[in-house]
Image (tube, rainbow, N blue to C red):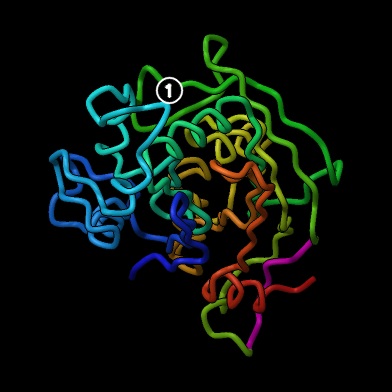
Amino acid sequence: MEPKVIFEDSELLVLDKPAGMIVNRSDTTRGEKTVQDWVEDYLKVSKGDAEVSEVSKGVLASPFDTFDTFPAFDTFLQRAGIVHRLDKETSGILLVAKTPQAFVNLQAQFKDRKVQKTYIALAHGKIEPESGEINVSVGRLPWNRKKFGVLSGGREAITKYKTINNLQLTINPTLPRLRGASNEPLTLLELYPKSGRTHQIRVHLQYIHHPIFSDPLYAGRKTSRNDRKLLSRIFLHASKISLNHPRTNEVLNFEIPLPEELNRFLEGLNS
């Protein structure tokens, strides 16, 4: 299980992250290879010290004279250039800056909401209307630090959505993994987060009472337990991204299809 490179030049690395892989290394990921570990190996960045790849060394120039004077250099190293994150079970597009300047530029694009992201999710129930906007603040729950929720003191969060297809979870004798499933409407969605809060899409869909299929945190204990008998990961995929190239300012668009396990699951549903 490793990321796939879908684009690379001297400033930018665009990856297809598999589900089940944590993005950033931490004290709780010891013994588990993260995307950060993979990037450091791929770009030959030494772990935990101030060495950088030859690519970065070659392009570090004006307006920054040295690494020491570059204010975000430590953060660039600490994150191995990874600009944003995806949850462990979420698959899809991940951006990595290969130079400190590109890192700062891409962070600014995210902050200014210039980066446009599209996710695909399968949600419980039939969502109506078929397109709309969810605009409620999201924050970490004081009583459960591992979860987020809609809080009055949270941070602004906006998610737009559009229905792709209305489906039915039902018994399908040709696909053994779906045998025993109860009849239930499901909605396949495209979602466009206009902010980047942790667990934003998951929290927003829970808020409108249509949690993501097989979400272990927000679908409810009984629902997620039943879901995961059929699908062992959350049905959430970062499918598209649009951004300006950090050096040339050219508009870049990337798109990747659903991974095989999600496509296979959809094939077992009735439309």
Q: Residue 150 sits in which quadrant? A: top right
In this figure, what is the number of numbered marks?
Answer: 1
Kindly give the residue lying farthest to the top in the view shown: 153
Q: Residues within 10 Å of mark 1 (few under 14, many from 20)?
A: some
Disc 1 residue type (three-letter): Arg
Residue 70 location (% of width, % of height)? 31, 25
Residue 175 location (% of width, % of height)? 59, 85
Question: Is 37 one of the magenta-colored residues?
Answer: no
Question: Is 170 one of the magenta-colored residues?
Answer: yes
Quarter of the image containing the N terminus? Answer: bottom left
Looking at the image, is 261 positioned above or below residue 152? Answer: below
Residue 56 location (% of width, % of height)? 32, 47
Kindly give the residue lying farthest to the bottom in the view shown: 174
Q: Residue at x 37, y 36 (%)?
A: 61
Question: What range of the chain is rendered magenta?
Answer: 166-173
Task: Name the element at disc 1.
Answer: strand
Quarter of the image containing the C terminus? Answer: bottom right
Q: Residue at x 50, y 43 (%)?
A: 220
* Left or right: 243, with 64 as reference point: right
Name the one closer to the observer, 102 or 223: 102
* Left or right: 258, with 95 as reference point: right
Residue 233 location (% of width, % of height)? 45, 61
Name the one closer to the observer, 64 or 128: 64
| Tag 1 residue | 140
Name the one closer to the observer, 196 or 65: 65
Name the one closer to the observer, 107 or 225: 107
Q: Residue at x 74, y 58 (%)?
A: 185
Looking at the image, is 2 positioned above or below residue 147? Answer: below
Q: Residue at x 38, y 45 (%)?
A: 59
Q: Residue 229 sits in which quadrant? A: bottom left
